[in-house]
Amino acid sequence: MSNLQKQFEKFHANIRLSDKDEKAKLQDKRELLIKDLRRGLKRDAEENSTPRLVFEHFNQGSYAMHTGTKPYNNDYDIDVGLIFDNTQDDFDSPVDLKKKIRNALNANFRKIKIRRPCVTVTYYKDGEPDYHVDLAVYVKIDDEEHFEIAMGKEHSSEENQEWQESDPKGLINKINNRLTGDERAQFKRVIRYLKRWRDKQFNNGGAPISIALTCAAYHWFQPASFDGELNDLRALYNLVDSMIDNFGFPSARLSVELPVIPGGDLLDKMTDKQMEVFNEKLEALKDALFDAKNETSDVDACKALEKLFGDEFPVPDEDTEKQSAVAPVVVTGTSA
């Protein structure tokens, strides 16, 4: 029976964002963008003789939840929340505020798109996307803790725009405080494994979004051990098994509830066909994890998992495994 904990931990080291290098680089880029936005909003207020828009910002998404992975396509993603010192009554519409942000940031070296949940700023290098920043835009409701997020695309009709009550900081706290100590570390590792599996297996669209995978783990993850040591293979297997068990009947859909306001199913945008493919791929992952758990050869087990997770999943050297399988000869006594 294979344990593979060392291989899973090496895999995790290969896919996680490193604290010193990549995270610092992304933080620098975020701070530069925030400075540009403050300058742009100040400039526009002076030019139009209007009140200057003031905001505070915070990290959100995988960066804040410590579940980030290196981008599979080299396009780094930074999620930032902007909380404006305003209420919705200060703007004509949710998209009105987003346009003010877009106009304040307009520059030749970046592309800005107003999407329904955020304003996306994409930076290019050698003609290819290098990284992008998703700016989620919030206004206050009645105090410092309750916010509304501006929802709507640039050309959305009035009925397709809304101020939606949101609790982004509450979500971050729930994910980060789901467990403690080594069990929390395993929880975060398993989320990263699921994300990389998604990246590898869904090449043609239809993939479940990252926050849905994170919240699925929030709802159904349970720490797992073997011989007194945490065992990521078992923990991932148990989570995938629980996700499959939660597919509905007869609709055969998985519903993952957002655990803070406004709630709702994070997978409701997936079509029935996409959900069917998702279910099939989860079943294949479950089978591969089961086989790996019961495989006598670590090499064969890891080769099977490499097909699902990509070449970042390490495969032990066959010669090393053969040598470790040979028991040492111990000579006792004396010759006659």
Image (cartoon, helix red, strand yellow):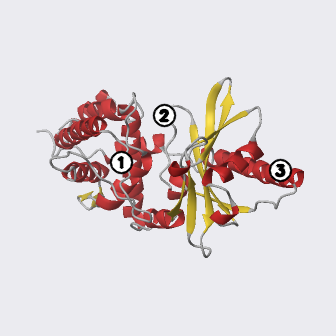
The one of 288 and 245 positioned closer to us in this rendering: 245
314 over 267 or under it: above or below: above
Single out the residue that lies furthest toward the left. 336
Identify residue for label 1: 267
**Tag 2: residue type?**
Tyr
**Tag 1: residue type?**
Leu
Instruction: Give the label on residue 44, or none.
Output: 3
Marks 1 & 2, CB-CB < 8 Å contact: no
Residue occupying the point 28% across, 48% down: 233
Identify residue for label 2: 72
252 over 200 or under it: above or below: below
Other-residue count near label 2 (Cα within 10 Å), few / some / many at <14 / 14–19 / ≥20: few
On-image quarter of the N terminus: top left
Looking at the picture, how far across and down is residue 244, in whole percent? 21, 48
Identify the mark nearer the N-term, 1 or 2: 2
Marks 2 & 3, CB-CB < 8 Å contact: no
Compute the Cα span from label 1 to label 2.
21 Å
Single out the residue that lies furthest toward the bottom. 143
The one of 328 and 330 positioned closer to us in this rendering: 328
**Tag 3: residue type?**
Asp
Instruction: Give the label on residue 114, or none.
Output: none
The kind of secondary structure element at disc 2 is: loop
Q: Nearer the viewer, mark 1 or mark 2?
A: 1
Looking at the picture, how far across and down is residue 130, in whole percent? 63, 33
Q: Nearer the viewer, mark 2 or mark 3?
A: 3
Looking at the picture, how far across and down is residue 228, in whole percent? 26, 62
Looking at the picture, how far across and down is residue 237, in whole percent? 24, 48
Residue occupying the point 76% across, 32% down: 108
Compute the Cα span from label 1 to label 3.
39 Å
Horizontally, residue 248 falls left or right of residue 16, namely left
The kind of secondary structure element at disc 3 is: helix
